[in-house]
Image (cartoon, helix red, strand yellow):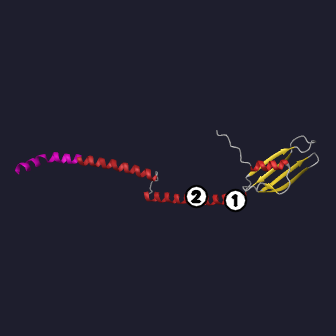
Amino acid sequence: MADLTTWLAGSAPSIAAILFALTLVWALLLTRRTRQLRARLDGLTRGERGSSLEAVLEAHLRRVRDVSDELQAIHQRTAALEAQMPAAVQQVGLVRFNPFEDTGSNQSFALALLDGHGHGVVISSLHSRQATRLYVKPVVAGQADRAMSDEEAQAISQAVAPPPASPRA
């Protein structure tokens, strides 16, 4: 036992040095880990100095609620517009023509303006050198309840016909 005490007394400075070195390495590792955690926290708070992570998360949640409320309002407006859309003018047909030989060009026209159900009007303009006359005839479900000229019937046909497929770029 005396030998162990003598050995420990003689090697105490070297044991202390080893413990000091281990403590120093441990402190350096903890310092590095602390810096990594600080960098991650700064990344989460997006550089908002002085703000706690809780305050940053509350601000983000507030923004999410605001966006959700705005999205709900947009959804309601979209639904209202979709409900009104069938009554809006969606189908248009235009035919230009020359009804009289004494005029120089196709300045007369028949214009069909129809909603999503095919209801609307046909407006006809007959242009001559002396006057221009306008006529309006109602259209219900794509059909007129009065006699139509060929140009008016053609304007309605254009309006109710499906649009041609557009070429893909």
Question: At label 1, which amino acid type do we have?
Answer: Gln
Q: Please indicate, yes or no, whether residue 52 appears anywhere in the rendered image.
A: no
Judge from the rendering whether residue 134 lies leftward or rightward of residue 21; answer left or right: right
**Tags 1 and 2 touching, CB below 8 Å:** no
Q: Residue at x 90, y 51 (%)?
A: 133
State the CA–CA distance, disc 1 to disc 2: 20 Å
Question: At label 2, which amino acid type do we have?
Answer: Leu
Question: Which mark is on residue 18?
Answer: none
For mark 1, what is the residue? 84
| Range covered by the magenta-colored residues | 1-21
Position of residue 165 measured from the top left corner of the image (x, y, whole percent): 68, 43
Give 69 or 143, whichever is nearer the viewer: 143
Position of residue 29 measured from the top left corner of the image (x, y, whole percent): 30, 47
* Mark 1 burial class by Cα count in 10 Å: few <14, some 14-19, many 20+: few
Mark nearer the N terminus (1 vs 2): 2
The answer to whether 68 is drawn above or below residue 11 in the figure is: below
Foreground label between 1 and 2:
1
Magenta span contains residue 13:
yes
Q: Residue at x 27, y 48 (%)?
A: 26
Give 61 or 33, whichever is nearer the viewer: 61
Question: Which mark is on residue 71?
Answer: 2
Q: Quadrant of the C terminus?
A: top right
Position of residue 98 measured from the top left corner of the image (x, y, whole percent): 88, 43
Could you say whether the residue bearing mark 2 is in a helix, strand or loop?
A: helix
Position of residue 132 measured from the top left corner of the image (x, y, whole percent): 90, 49
